[in-house]
Image: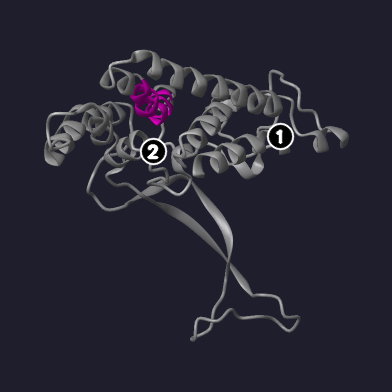
């Protein structure tokens, strides 16, 4: 749509702004499909099969509440639920056409996630390379269109000026988020909780973050996804520090205006 919008600025001697189906085919074949195939190569699931039931490597024993014929929990004379020991030996694993949806959601800044925890899920974002590609995809089109705009209006300086402004704001917000999260939660520090980096912990505020990605990649993703009004996540923003959480909040509110 934006390309068609820019064509409206550029074209002066024709009455149309392009063909919708041509633009759709080019976008799907030359942009969305290649990214989806790369994500599949990294381990992102892409299948129309139903969920898989597999045996657990280590069975889990737990207390299972007893129920009556109506399905209501049975309670003892003290009002506590009556339980019986049970053992889980199988697990249901959700799968589906994730890779094709992820390439669309990231490049199209549609946000959301195929799985419940979004891009923190190992089936949706399994490797460092898949994390980098998805992160790049969030900003790729919006950043590239700055230069595209300059080319189409025959003044690339305008495109570079827009991109430079966006970059300055982005880097400043990223620095705030990364610094705040790396310094840890001040409330926990007052309670004597050790949040310094060591051989046994990465340090900083790791609450709500994937150990695979750490603070740097989490803060970078949080800044990028909210700057582009994307909505996908690889960490949980409600677990950020007050100042670190202010960055995605400010980004999102500014993008929504």
Is 68 above or below relative to 151? below
Find numbered disc 2 in the image and state the secondary structure of the residue it sits on: loop
Left or right: where 192 falls relative to 140: right
The residue labelled by disc 1 is 243
The mark that comes first in sequence, 2 or 1, is: 2
Counting from the top left corner in percent of width and height, residue 211 is at 57, 30
Find numbered disc 1 in the image and state the secondary structure of the residue it sits on: helix
Mark 2 and mark 1: Cα distance apart in space: 25 Å
The span shown in magenta is 132-146
The residue labelled by disc 2 is 109
Are dots 2 and 1 in contact, CB under 8 Å? no
Residue 165 forms part of the magenta stretch: no
Residue 135 forms part of the magenta stretch: yes
Counting from the top left corner in percent of width and height, residue 116 is at 45, 49
Is 219 above or below relative to 55? above
Counting from the top left corner in percent of width and height, residue 75 is at 66, 80
Counting from the top left corner in percent of width and height, residue 133 is at 38, 25
Q: Nearer the viewer, residue 192 or 233?
A: 233
């Amino acid at each position: 749509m934006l390309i068609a919008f820019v064509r409206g600025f550029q074209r002066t001697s024709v009455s149309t702004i392009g063909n919708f189906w041509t633009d759709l085919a080019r976008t799907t074949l030359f942009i969305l499909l290649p990214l989806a195939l790369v994500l599949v190569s990294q381990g992102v699931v892409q299948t129309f099969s139903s969920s898989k039931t597999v045996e657990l490597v280590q069975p889990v024993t737990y207390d299972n509440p007893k129920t009556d014929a109506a399905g209501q929990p049975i309670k003892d004379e003290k009002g506590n639920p009556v339980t019986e020991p049970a053992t889980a030996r199988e697990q249901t694993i959700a799968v589906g056409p994730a890779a094709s949806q992820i390439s669309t959601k990231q490049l199209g800044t549609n946000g959301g996630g195929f799985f419940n925890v979004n891009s923190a899920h190992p089936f949706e974002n399994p490797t460092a390379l898949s994390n980098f590609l998805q992160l790049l995809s969030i900003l790729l089109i919006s950043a590239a269109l700055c230069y595209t705009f300059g080319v189409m209006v025959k003044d690339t300086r305008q495109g570079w000026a827009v991109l430079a402004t966006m970059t300055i704001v982005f880097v400043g917000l990223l620095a705030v988020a990364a610094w705040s999260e790396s310094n840890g939660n001040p409330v926990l520090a007052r309670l004597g909780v050790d949040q310094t980096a060591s051989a046994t912990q990465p340090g900083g505020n790791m609450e709500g973050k994937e150990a695979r990605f750490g603070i740097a990649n989490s803060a970078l993703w949080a800044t990028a996804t909210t700057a582009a009004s994307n909505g996908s996540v690889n960490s949980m923003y409600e677990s950020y520090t007050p100042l670190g959480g202010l960055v995605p909040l400010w980004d999102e509110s500014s993008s929504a205006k």
